[in-house]
Image (spheres, grey):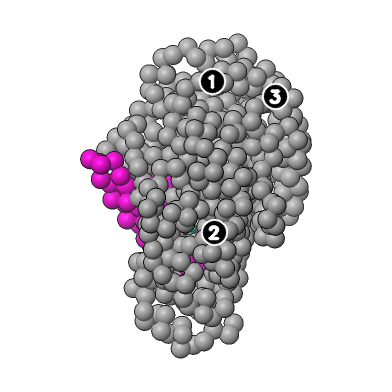
Amino acid sequence: VGIEHTALQVLSETVSGEVVTSTDAGYDTVRAVWNGAFDRRPAVIVRCRTAADVSAAVNFGRDQGMPLAVRGGGHSLAALSTCDAGVMVDLSLMKDVTVDAENRRAFVQPGVLGQEMDAATQLHGLGTTLGTVSHTGVAGLTLGGGYGWAMRKYGLACDNVTSFEAVLADGRIVVASATANPDLFWALRGGGGQLAVVTGFEYVLHEFGPAISLAQFIFDPKKSLGALKVARDLAADTDGDRNMWLAYLYMPPDPDMPEDVRGQFVCLIMAVSLNPKDTDSDWLDPLLAEQPLMVERRTCEYFELQTMFDEDNAHGVGAYSKGAFFDSLSDEALEVFARAADNVVGEPLVYLQQVGGAVADVADGETAVGWRSADYVLNVIQRWTDPAVADACRSWAREFVASMQPLGMGGQPLNFAGDLASGMSSSDDVLFGSAYGRLLGIKRAVDPNEVFGPLGG
Ligand SMILES: Cc1cc2nc3c(=O)[nH]c(=O)nc-3n(C[C@H](O)[C@H](O)[C@H](O)COP(=O)(O)OP(=O)(O)OC[C@H]3O[C@@H](n4cnc5c(N)ncnc54)[C@H](O)[C@@H]3O)c2cc1C
């Protein structure tokens, strides 16, 4: 690669973090991202420690005309946080979380993972919406909206951000809030990572946890349609503490589980409530009549809930994902959903997550998040360890989502986009719904030369 040697040397001397290239020990460890289907080789990795480091890295990449990829937690399903022959702006060393419990605020750097933020806030009995796998970065998750168990009560992760510090494509460090750079503030809440590099997030915190209520009902996947319908009806119009999650997945080979569940592909209906008293309520009792193979209802710690899917989603396996939004779940949609169990290929996690509540209370157009009025979001996360089956796994996910799509609103949740969206035209609204027009205008204003790549990746 024709990197100007002097420029690279100046960069190394300027930043307080490290500059890593392919000849350095540790290059392979540092460049690895969560999705093992991607093995890209950045020419330069800048391991930033400060916003000034980020600014220097952005200036370097832009001036050298090299592709730039920004890495927070590295979980991008489309591997947007890495690139070949470009500059990876690695934020993973920027790990500070400061909690101001009195004012219910958290100041969070962009290398922080969900588990690190949850641990720091739960110490004070506080939290905000983050995702369901705790080794996901808060940065990418929040910029793409951020769905999680607290969202029906407190909104998406991005709805809880009151201000960002960000490095623009021209290297300037700015604040974006309701009063400073309000267009950028609007766009960063749901518009994804291609607008600016966020170097600091200020979140609002809420009082919940450590105790919450967890219920899991496991069904034979071939006899699960009735249970899906019951769960849907129970979840309709329920309060914002409660969340319904309908899934098909392989259970772990846990020796404590009954044989017909352990390691099997099952239907899992999970209901979580931020209100621990819900453990004693009878709201889920109708599911007992649907002949579950296993039932677990208990009070648990919020942190346990947030980390319970971590091991099943370990780094390094190949993955692909695709999804869609649903404004209601018709019987027909559930019938098609239940066909997930018919001809399983790979190791899919197929789920419908209840949205609504506080997510839908924020008006469309108030942030760059599209599809706010959806009642459910469908995601298929396909995983494989043998690269020979990768294409079959991807096709399975695409075909399954295509079979569901006509029964819903369409769209594609940005955080679960396994395909790149580049080449969108101004009429495209797949990733951003009705927010797309305004977002595109802001992208053109803040990053006209697409230093951070095209909107949506
Ligand atoms: C196993 C798994 C479970 C998941 N569960 C959930 C879930 O429950 N809810 C949910 O909403 N999403 C979920 N996601 C999706 C996840 O939120 C997105 O993949 C998210 O983009 C990951 O953020 P990251 O910082 O870890 O990833 P990265 O790969 O580092 O970044 C993702 C994108 O954001 C950009 N980016 C990262 N940091 C910054 C920054 N500071 N400034 C500007 N751009 C930045 C990157 O360039 C890239 O485009 C899950 C993903 C996986 C793999």
Q: Which residue is mark 3?
A: 330
Q: Nearer the viewer, mark 2 or mark 1?
A: 2
Q: What residue is drawn where x is 29% and y is 35%?
A: 125
Identify residue type, mark 1: Asp
**Percent x, y for residue 51?**
37, 66
The answer for how far apart the CA atoms under marks 2 and 3 are is: 37 Å
Element assignment for label 3: loop
Q: Is residue 113 above or below residue 86?
A: above
**Percent x, y for residue 49?**
36, 66
Q: Which residue is mark 1?
A: 237
In the rendered view of the protein, which quadrant contains the C terminus? bottom right
Element assignment for label 2: helix
The answer for how far apart the CA atoms under marks 1 and 3 are is: 15 Å
Whether residue 102 is in magenta: the answer is yes
Rendering quarter of residue 264: top right
Count neighbours of disc 2 (C-alpha within 10 A) and say few if under 14, some if 14 to 19, many if 20 or more: some
Identify residue type, mark 2: Ile
Mark 2 or mark 3: whose residue is earlier in sequence: 3
Identify residue type, mark 3: Ser
Q: What residue is drawn where x is 39% and y is 63%?
A: 174
Q: What residue is drawn where x is 34% and y is 40%?
A: 205
**Percent x, y for residue 119?**
34, 43
Q: Closer to the camera, 318 or 232?
A: 232
The answer for how far apart the CA atoms under marks 2 and 1 are is: 36 Å
Mark 1 or mark 3: whose residue is earlier in sequence: 1
Q: Which residue is mark 2?
A: 442
Q: Which residues are magenta?
A: 88-117
**Percent x, y for residue 38?**
62, 61
Element assignment for label 1: loop
